[in-house]
Amino acid sequence: MRPFTLCYFSAHSMEIPSLSAGVRQYQEGGGKIRIVARTRSQLFDESRIEAFVRDALNCDAVLVVLHGGRESCPAFDALAKAVTEKKDHGEKTPCFHIHPQGSDEDGLLAAREYDDAFGTDRWDTLNRYLMHGGRVNFQNMLIYLYNLLFDEEVPCDPPQRLPQEGIYHPDIPGIPDVKDYLKQKVDPEKITAGLWFYQSYWLNDNLAYIDAVIREIELQGANVICVFHFRYKDAERGNRGADYVVDNFFMDNGRPRIDVLISPMMFSLTLAAPEYKDLLPKLNVPFIQAMVTMNSYAEWKEGLQGVSTMDVSFSAAQPEFDGALITVPVATREQEDIDPVTGALLARYVPIPERVKKMVSLSLNWARLRKISNKDKKIAIVFHHYPPRNDRIGCAAGLDSFESVKLLLDRMKEEGYWIDRIYESGDELARELLDRMTCDQRWLTPERMAQRAAAHAGEEMFGPWHEALPAPIREKMTADWGEVPGDLFVHEGKMHFAGLINGNIFITIQPPRGYFENIDKIYHDFYLSPPHHYLAHYRWIKDVFRADAVMHVGKHGSLEWLPGKALGLSDACYPDLAIMDLPNVYPYIINDPSEGTQAKRRSYCCIIDHLTPAFTNADLYEDLAKVENLLKDYADAGREDPGKLPVLRPMIWEALKAADLHKDLEISEKDAFADFDALLEKLHGYLADLADTMINDGLHIMGKSPEEDRLVEFLVQLTRLPNGGTPSLRESALNALGYDYDDLLENKGKSLLRFQNKTGGQIIQSAHEKGLAMVKALEESRFDAAGIDAVVESHLGRRDKNVAAVLHYICEILTPNIRRVTDEIDSSLTGFDGGFVLPGPSGAPSRGQADILPTGRNFYSVDPQKIPTPGAWEVGKKLGEALISRCLEETGKYPEGVGIIVWGGSTMRTKGDDIAEIYYLMGVKPVWAKGSGDVTGLEVIPASELGRPRLDVVPRISGFFRDSFPNLVERIDEAARIVAALNEPPDANILRRNVLRDAEGYMKEGMAGEEAMREATFRVFGCPPGTYGAGVSELVESKNWKTQEDLGNNYIRYSAHAYGKGSYGRQKPAAFRNLLSRMDVTVKNEDSREYDMMSCTDFYNYYGGLIVAAKTVRGELPFALVGDSSDPKRVKMRTTFEEAKHVLRSRLVNPKWLEGMKRHGYKGAGDISHMMDVVLGWDATAEVIDDWMYKKIAEKFALDPAMQEWMREVNPYALQNILDKLLEAISRGMWNADPDMENELREAYLEMEGEIEGLTE
């Protein structure tokens, strides 16, 4: 046989051992071949890519095995271009074959474009050899190639099908029969774990980590049924798919023979094969994701990123779509020697023994829940408590946590759990916890605290617990908190733990994180360890109380935010040390996928998503309603009695002043009367905007649907925007009445003839009321869809198919889905039973995403590779245009620097609006792969098309964004470098102008040219690796600051960590300050009115912090904006001051919101108190709260007798905190209060302090 040369590329290298064996067999049979094989990891720079292309062009055949499109081969574009050029010049080219693996659509498109044999027998045959793999197929493939190249007919077998699924055990040769294996290896008295893995790993003998998992399962006393398989059905392979594996290996006559299923497989089963969506629910056992990272052991162990960028998508985000519970990495990818036969770099997955042990222990604990009777099952229920004040126990965004737990306990009692006492109400449970030891140390002496504690741990317990920690952790905790047990919650040498024991249920409070107990560390230590008491508390739950599972109640706790790796935690990460191997069930609000995902990935929990609070229109009230009524009188007089107009004008002005609306509108009396019609139009529009703002109506209670009028309003709000193919209710109603919604919005304050002398806002309000009336009529008929046409006709005067379509959606889909909130309690119990909790989508239901319901699901988020989506790109462009428009309107010029806050939550909910805006402002756009929709790169928008300068944008990312979207961090950094490299004039490219200026400065300081350019192009900044936060809210809440510079400088300390090429969070304070020095514009976008800037401290911590940091460096506040894309088709851009006024009037002092919160007693009052924390934080950082705003808050919350009485009854600590914050604002000079009001506040504060001291004695 004649010699030939083969160039072979493998994207993932797993088949290289089989290829090497096939080559040896071919040579032993007389074949002569020289092979040049390379893997993806070998082509890491241009010189190696060029050498590979040269080798390929000189070979007789080139085989390119892709795995994830052409991007998976670093040399693909260069190779395809070189082959194409040779063809175009009539030169001889190698036999060029492209093999796309699996459902690789981009790879298939590449083959169609560049493989001349695409679709022919040759292409098909080579694909089948490569697809089936194994030594024999590679050997025969080489003979087949030889025959192709030399037109000979050396005998060779066609591609052979190999075993596609079967049981594997390292002690049993071959593939055992199921019945024989069960007899030999499965003890029916023991727990049985299922384990499935890739057929290709079995085929290529890459089994070390599978062996390790099998051995550990057996070592821990359980059975294992391990099955290799190819999960997607493929007629050519002849495999039978994942459903066959489940039915025949993991089930027996429809009943599971396993108690847990462990999966080290990457990607999503159901995204690629939706027909499998009912497979795991049918099996109904916990589904555990055992991560296998592409990082080496050294990279994983030493790096705070933990796993690779690709792992985040492939081994976390995508498996979450299947309902997987994310755990820890059990194996790392280790590169071995160069294969002497092929020249390819060999790689193997090598187990991490300690992590294998951890994963198996956690998996078997989930499985044990299936075996323990409810009467014997012990559950710890953990309420969050942040900040550690008595008004804030049970903090959980949007949730009445106490009433929810009360209903859960009621149901658990019915299901046979041992519970001694059932509570009359959630408030009764809250009072019982308050009567005991809490995390608020201000009111109890150490002795009283010890007396009221639920549990204790002496040195005989906490000593061994501490010694069991890894040495570096012990040393760090001792350095931070002194020798164990430290001082926190310690009395007479014992640790004391909060809570109460009710039968087999331990109801407790999460221990404090430690920021308020070690205040100086906020300024000096990013990596403050949790106190000794924190880890001991969880250890007591596991070892002494002997909990079988734990539940953390609501968004969010501190455990999942403790320092440690981003994903793929080690035993030196604090969340891992705290949660240990406890099954963790975690109810979480559906509209915050980011923080819930953090809990999934860093506390290994099963999310049980819960509904948002019901929504309602803000409407107008009190002084605003009075102004509105005068405006109506004025309009009536204009039509019927014009002589009254001169009398009404000053009345309107006085009412407007009394409501402080002239400050909102920024108009003087002189200007108002100079053009009164213009004032009226502005006022009409402003009030219409306030009245039409969606706000929350109270809190959600798990398992309880809003009913009657609250349900009606909720349904109308959820259909305010289109939902998928279902149109908008209000827009459809307006169209049916002959109006154009956008025309009305543009003329909200104008009274026009074509509007029958009504304003656009009044007509929109009328349509909203008609919507309410129609849905109310349906609610009264128990949502009988048969009456829809009659309802529409009776309220609109005609039938309309679009309005009817929305009402059918409400009756047949939306209402039933809302009422399935009962699944929230059911799924919590499913978690405690060791069952499979169904996965479901997450997002903001009011943003046209009502189809994410029902709740009670283990929610998933997004695939990072697809961000931003084409839809998000369009919204991001609108946000960018709105920002530029406001800047030009305010300053008359383009900004020198734009700071933008980027959070993971909004990125998940919107699929990347903020990212799209950053790209658009810089002047680049995403490139999407055909078919998959993955973003594969960036493209520069030509200057002629852009029509404006490229802007200099600096994203301040959150820690969660860094962890979950490392690909986007890299892409934004790439965008900045691309734009900085464009040869464009300074006025056309502000980013490049700034980069060149900074680089020149760095070079003058002694930096080399390349280093200076890299330093100058850093644009993505965030907190240090392994940490979270911005360093501002802790200072504000602990009162540990004197000047705004304290806040600004600490924000800079936390934020000056650069992310991008060559830098994973390296400290770059000079570079960050440089960027802040010209940051004349800042922005944070809000994608939903389900929350707002006053909803939680994170808003001012991150965004207020950025504003005060810019002021600290620049000497003046930047032009600070808030983008509103709650209606993605119609984005708005307000200043932070405008937004603060809008939120205050539409929600904070709105009786409608307050009455909603008052329905929830202790928890409602605690959330109102928390609002005051946020108000103070915003004013401390961004100066957005005026005196009149403080005055309204004081009158509404602190000094109103009815409100005082209610708070004294349900949560006196909340009233005390509100008074405290108002007085702090006065003492810091933030509020110039009237002396009489100040005295009244001081008297009320002293009175409350005395009352509380009496309560705690």
Image: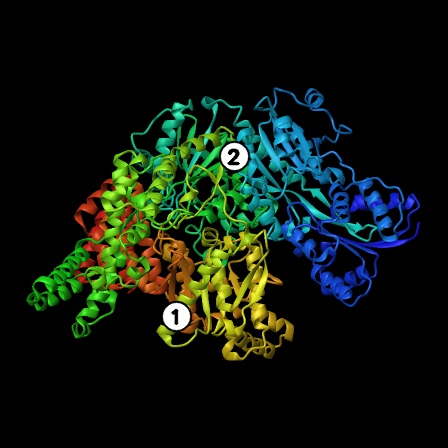
- Kindly identify which residue carries mark 1: 885
Q: Secondary structure at mark 1?
A: helix
- Residue under the point 53% across and 26% down: 370
Is 916 situated left or right of 1180 in this image? right
Q: Secondary structure at mark 2?
A: loop
- Which residue is more in the foreground, 1154 or 574? 1154
Q: Amino acid at mark 1?
A: Ser
- Which residue is more in the foreground, 140 or 21? 140
Q: Quadrant of the C terminus?
A: top left
- Residue under the point 45% across and 34% down: 456
Residue 777 falls in image quadrant: top left
- Kindly identify which residue carries mark 2: 583
What is the count of numbered marks? 2
Q: Amino acid at mark 2?
A: Pro
- Which residue is more in the foreground, 3 or 1223? 3
Whichever of callouts 1 and 2 sits on the residue coming sooner in the sequence is 2
Query: Is 874 rendered above or below residue 674?
Result: above
Query: Badge 2: few (under 14), some or many (20 or more) residues near its Cα, within 10 Å?
Result: many
- Which residue is more in the foreground, 685 or 1083? 685
Is 378 situated left or right of 729 in this image? right
